[in-house]
Every structure is written in C-alpha cells, then in structure tokens.
Image (cartoon, helix red, strand yellow):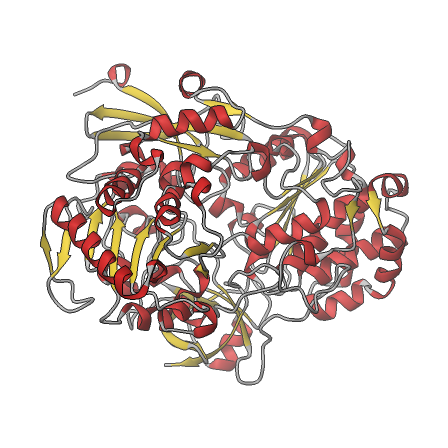
Amino acid sequence: MKTANSIEVRASACPHDCPSTCALEIERLGPQEIGRVRGASDNSYTAGVICAKVARYAERTHHPDRILHPLKRKGAKGSGEWEQISWDEALDTIVQEFNKREEAFGSETIWPYYYAGTMGLVMRDGINRLRHVKNYSGQFSTICVNLAFAGWMAGAGAYRGADPTEIAKSDVVVIWGTNAVHTQINVMTHATRARKERGAKIVVIDPYRNATALSADMHVMVKPGTDGAFACAVMHVLFKENLADRAYLEKFTANHAEFEAHLETRTPEWAEKISGVPADQIREFARLVGTTPKSFFRLGYGFSRSRNGAVNMHAASCIPAVTGAWQYEGGGALHTNSAIYHWNKKLIEGLDVVNPKIRMLDQSRIGEVLTGNKQDLGDGPPVTALLIQSTNPMDVAPDLAKVHKGFAREDLFVAVHEQFMTETAKMADIILPATTFVEHDDIYQGGAQNHIMLGPKVIEPLGEARSNHDVICALAERLGAKHRGFEMTPLEIIDETLKTSGWPDVETLRQDKWKNTQPSFEQSHYLKGFGHKDKKFHFAADWSRIGTDFSGMPSFPDHWDVIEKATDETPFRLVTAPSRNFLNTSFTATPSSLKKEKKPTVMIHPKDAARLKVSKEDIVRIGNKRGSVLIHAEIFDGMQPGTVIVEGIWPGKFFIEKVGINILIGSDAAKPNGGAAFHDTAVWIKPN
C-alpha cells in the first residue's frame, strides 16, 4: 500500500464544459490507475477549490461500465445487442460506409458532429481537420454561447473583461445568468473571500432560489427572460438619481444622451409588471451598485438560454458602463476571456484547407437535419452518416422527438466515439471506446478565467480506449485524407500551436503548468478604449455586425418580447437549469452523483400546486406541442408562481417513459446569430 508521501501527483486541467477550467493535481497510483483529484492551490484562479464531481473523477475513469472495446451493432437499432470487434474491423467498417455514401450522395452527406464533452483544443477540435480535408458537411456550433456572446460584443466590442480574481477585491459582486455553486464554483471562492475580507455584498439575479441565491445577501428573482426589463429599470434609477458617472459616460461611451432619453419610460414600476421584481427592490439594487464603485458584474451563459438573450446580455452589460465601475480594480464586468488567447488553430482544425462552398449545418437543429428539413439541408444531400465525438445529442439536443426520429432512420449510419453507453451510443452502428482526459495529452484555456493549461497524460489508456486524435488520424489514413496534422502527436501539435500563437513552447508550459494570459489592467478594464472602432462602449447595438438574422431587434436595451410566452393552453414557463452533480449528461453514470441527484423532478410553486391539486412526489405530465414527459413533482416556493424548474439533463433512461426533458425544448434559431433557447419554454402541467 502506498503512503501519502510515496504517491506521485501530476498536474493537469479539468476538461469539462465549465468556464472555470480548474487547474488540477491528480494522484497517479499506477500505470493505469488514478486516485484523488484536487484543485491546484498555487493557481491564482482555482485557488485549491474544485467541484465535488471532479474531485471524485476516479469513479468515472475506473467505472465498471466504461466502454473499453470497439462494438458493432448486431440487432435492431437501439436494441442494445452488440458484439465486440477489433479496431481494424471497426475503422474499416466506418470507412467503407463513409465511402459508399460519399460515392452515392457526395461528401456533404457525411456530418462529423461534436461538442464540448472535452474542452481540450486538440481532442475537441481536431475532428474539424478531417471535416475540412474531406469536404464533409460543416457544423455551426449553437448549443451554448452564441446569444450571450452576441450581447456582450454589442456593448464592449471584444471578448475580454476584468481579471476574475478581482472579484475578491470587490465591494459588491453581482452574479447574473449563472448558478455558480453548481457550474463554476471558483466564482464563489473569490466572492466569499470578498465578503469575508471586505464585507462585500453578494447579489444573485436568477429566476429561482438555487444554491447560489441561498448564499447571497440579495436575491433578485426575475421571471425567465425578463432580465432586460430589470436592467433597464435599474439604469433608469441610476440616471434619475444622479448615480450615473457622467464624466465616464462622456469619455468612454457612445449615444449615452439618447440612451438616457430612451430609459425615461423604463421605470421600476414598468419593469415590475414584466419581471415580477418589486419596484422597491429594483431601486435598492440600483442604489447599491450606483453608490459602490467597486461593483463586479459576473455575467454568465444563462443569457444564451432565452430567445431574447442577446438583448438581455447587452442590457446587463450596460450597467457598469453607466456607473463607471470599469475604472476601479474590483469593478467592471466579465463574461468571457476567450479573445485573450489569440490562438492560431490552423494546424489543429485544418483551417488551411477549408472549402468555403461546403454547407454549414446547425448543431442545434440536428433533429430537423436528420429528418430531412430542406431549409436546414440547403441545396445539399441528406445526411446519411454521422461521426460523433464528445457529445450526446440523443439527450442534450433540443426538440428530442425529431432527434430520436432522425436517429431511428434505417439508412443512417452512425459511428460514436464514447466513454459510456449513452443514449446516442445506443443508436450507433459502431461504437469506439474513448479515453478520459487523464489518458491523453491536451491543452486547455480558461473560458472565464485567464490561464492556458497543459493537460499531460497521467495514465495509460484503459482497455482498448483511444483518444479523439488517434481516431481521427486512423480514419484519415484509411480515407486517404492528407494533412500534416494527421502525422503529428498531440504534443507536437500543442507545441506548434503555442509557438505560432505567440506563447512559450510546450516544454516551458509543462514546467510552469500554466500561463497567466490576463492583459494589463488598462486593457482588461477598457481604459484605453473598448473594442469597437470608435473605442467606445455602445449603448446602441448594431446587431447587423454580429449576426445575419437581426430584423426586429431593438437597438437600445429593452424588454424584447419574443420569448415563448405563457398562454391559457401552456400557462407555465420552464427553466431546465443545471444540476450540481451532473454537467449536461457527463457524470450521470457516476454512482455518487446519481445518489445525490436521486431522480428527475419538476419544481412547482405551492400556489400552482394547489391549483393543480398536486402534492410532493406525485407524478405529473408536463408538456407542450413538441411532446411531454412524466416526472415527479417537488413543491418549492423559491420562484415566482408560473415558473417551473427541472434541474439537470438526465438521460432518457431515468425518465418514466424513457425520453428526456429536452423533448419540450424548441430548436428554432434565436436572433441574431442562432442558438437554441433551452430556458425559454412554455408548458402545461397535468396530474397523471
């Protein structure tokens, strides 16, 4: 038995789809065994704290249900009948099916489909190199960030913000559009430090009393999709009560006089009717941030989940520009730091061989694509083959009824590279066993922090598992696809990408573990000008510069009433919020996570439950025109009546009728730049 002093500890980084991208220390117990996983205490952002689900990562890596060998379907689709085959047979079968379909329909009939099961740049994005070399259909990624990115860009003009560790130097921390306790625990690390050391106030703006709201000094409980109305009323008060920094507005912003006039009618009473937030609380919040220069606005991806999310994000981001909070350390705002890394991804993604004539298919519209919607397919052929890595669309995509119908097509060939038998893997013809992040080399960037981190291989792959890079390269060889990236190891690609992007080489990064890339205070706080050509923050958004579908969008912040409204037929507004112990469908196979989450439930306000004659643990049917699910009721007074909450993307197998909550979610593309609105759904509820 190894003692604590004899256990080797390796540095790494969390690969999962979370803005924190925590720096890790991983115990290596043997060539193919890991032990405990801890946060790196010497990383300024992680600060030794990670979420419990990643701390238990040995459960996932060494889970008895890991897929460790290639499998071939031998029964009907979805029957669960498999036979173990060799890697050669698996790869040869995929290539034979791809070539047959390409000969019949052209290269665009094949759609490599992926997302953020890993956030490592090599393992996540390398699939695009094969796509581009082979002229397979492109993927327009729309699942997560588009609308929030659009709203931020409309105002600030660049994807960067204040150093996230400045939260600890704030006097007011506003957490808006993110349940940080569930999805990025490090925000809470720095916020609670500010409270402890400075007496800072923590304000949470969220539709329900979640774990983050429970830790706050003030919870602003907005109705889903009404953030813009709340933000406008806050700024109305700031201008009316002379809490706006007019010197800052004159120097750093554009159209501030017109904007102030626009807000004249956006009173707290106006916003209360829309958002349900009491006018007095709107004034209280406005006065708090208006009299506290060091107010830090941490704006999350929740804005992307509403059809009016771009407008709402823009509205929220305007508040620190009105108060001038950007001038102060511990003030300002952060949504994403994605632009500070200035990556050259030509080698990783094969950007030197992109054919601009190849069609782009919308990731969120996979149901429409697979069921043959002509508008989605454009002038190209039907999709008859999928190569899927790092995602589980049979659970996580919207409009699941269409997704399931598409995957059930007998003429559709599906190859899935996976760690577990997900709902998507169940519909595959060939399953390839995938490594976890401790079994391969990769490089990571912090989405809402400021470090580049190396994730070196900690242990050898279990069973016959292979990395995403290895699979793409093996397929490329058999398909005759030529690119020098297919001839390189992940570390060689990482090294060249670092150097061509202006960063130290891979060996320097290995020695240092990470590289802090935060720009100077002046750049991070836009004190040398914002990202637009005029160097000003823009209160008037030019949506035409951000997306192609911008008609009808308001220029100035407002309540843009395009959400899926409650009606007599569908009187409830559903939010499918993230759970604490899952991350999308990752960790839904981990025993400890399942034990803590228990089962899918819908939270219903006591007043609504009384009208519905529903009690705790009753089974109810929740539905709309897209479909319905049976689910257990939980009675909860932590949201406004008319709002219902389902936490977590539970795999379909955990629901009574074996289909997940996203059957209720629309796949229509939101303006201006696309994206499904996962928290913007009207539903009815009926006792079962």
Quarter-wise, where is residue 558 in the image?
Answer: bottom right
Q: What residue is rendered at 10% in x and 63% in y? A: 74
Q: Where is 532 relative to 588, above or below?
A: above
Q: Where is 231 relative to 160, above or below?
A: below
Q: Which quadrant holds the C terminus? A: bottom left
The image position of residue 569, as x and y in percent, is 53, 85
192 relative to 109 in the view: left or right: right
**From where the camera sits, is residue 97 visible?**
yes
Towards the viewer: 190 or 356? 356
Towards the viewer: 215 or 663? 663
Give the mark count. 0
Residue most extreme to the bottom: 568
Q: What residue is rendered at 48% in x and 21% in y? A: 42
**From where the camera sits, is residue 25 visible?**
no
557 relative to 498 in the view: left or right: right
The image position of residue 576, as x and y in percent, is 47, 62
Q: Which quadrant holds the N terminus? A: top left
Towards the viewer: 54 or 423? 423
The image position of residue 676, as x and y in percent, is 51, 63
Q: Where is 226 relative to 64, above or below?
A: below
395 relative to 100 in the view: left or right: right
675 relative to 474 in the view: left or right: right
The image position of residue 665, as x and y in percent, is 46, 69
Quarter-wise, where is residue 631 in the image?
Answer: bottom left
